[in-house]
Image: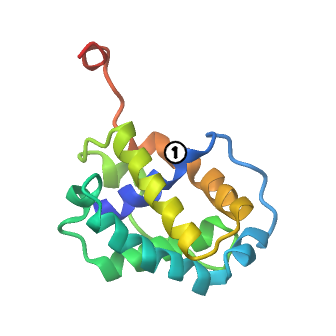
């Protein structure tokens, strides 16, 4: 379950951390509703598991459960009728030592899945902007001693 949450938070890095005002369910509709979101997540999860940059975070993950959790979370974030009931991002990622590089790899993979499923560019950016605030709870802060390495 932790890795599922790593994934959701990781989506946010590609966009500024400011969250745009909500516009009802326009983003949800632009993604094709819950079915459209699920289609992207069904494409996304196998890509995460196959990519050597992100695979270690997902090796023990139940893929079907991950698709379900991501679908619910993105559905909620997009203004849809879903309610995400998973573990909070900070709790799920606290022991994973996720770097900015790891996070960015996940966002890159998500963009590949969004492109593959035909999500319009503006709708891609809209979702990433809504997910962006999660970045703070996912990426492990770099200490001053680590920056010098």
The way the protein has been coloured in the rendering is rainbow
**SS of the residue under disc 1:** helix
User: Based on the displayed image, in which of its 4 quarters is residue 80 positioned?
Assistant: bottom right
Q: Where residue 117 sits: x, y (%)? A: 57, 76
Asked if one can make out residue 1 in the rendered structure from this viewpoint, the answer is no
Pinpoint residue 145: horizontal percent, then vertical percent.
Answer: 25, 14
Considering every residue shown, the one lying at the far bottom of the view is 35
Q: Residues within 10 Å of mark 1 (few under 14, many from 20)?
A: many
Q: Is residue 71 above or below residue 105?
A: below
Examine the rendering and report whether any part of residue 106 can be seen.
Answer: yes
The residue drawn where x is 27% and y is 12% is 148
Is residue 6 or residue 89 the one in the foreground?
6
The image shows residue 56, relative to residue 84, as above or below, that is: above
Residue visible at 60% across and 54% down? 128
Q: Quadrant of the N terminus?
A: bottom left
Residue found at x 34% / y 64%: 48
Work out whether residue 78 or residue 14 is closer to the camera in this orientation and state it: 14
Q: Position of residue 37 (x, y in %)?
A: 57, 77
Decide: is 98 above or below 71. Answer: above
Left or right placement of residue 35 versus residue 23 in this view: left
Q: Which residue is mark 1?
A: 13
Please state which of residues 2 and 63 is positioned toward the viewer in this rendering: 63
Q: Position of residue 5 (x, y in %)?
A: 38, 60
Quadrant hosting residue 69: bottom left
Quarter of the picture containing the C terminus is top left
Q: How many marks?
A: 1
């Amino acid at each position: 379950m932790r890795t599922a949450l790593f994934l959701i938070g990781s989506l946010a890095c590609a966009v500024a951390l400011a969250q745009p005002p909500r516009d009802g369910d326009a983003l949800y509709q632009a993604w094709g509703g819950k079915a459209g979101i699920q289609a992207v997540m069904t494409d996304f999860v196998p890509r995460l598991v196959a990519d050597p940059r992100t695979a270690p975070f997902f090796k023990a993950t139940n893929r079907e459960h991950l698709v379900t959790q991501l679908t619910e979370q993105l559905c909620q974030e997009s203004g849809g009728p879903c309610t995400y009931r998973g573990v909070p991002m900070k709790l799920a990622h606290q022991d994973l030592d996720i770097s900015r590089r790891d996070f960015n790899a996940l966002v890159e993979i998500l963009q590949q899945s969004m492109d593959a499923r035909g999500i319009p560019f503006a709708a891609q950016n809209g979702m990433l902007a809504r997910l962006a605030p999660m970045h703070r709870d996912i990426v492990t802060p770099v200490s001053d001693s680590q920056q010098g390495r």
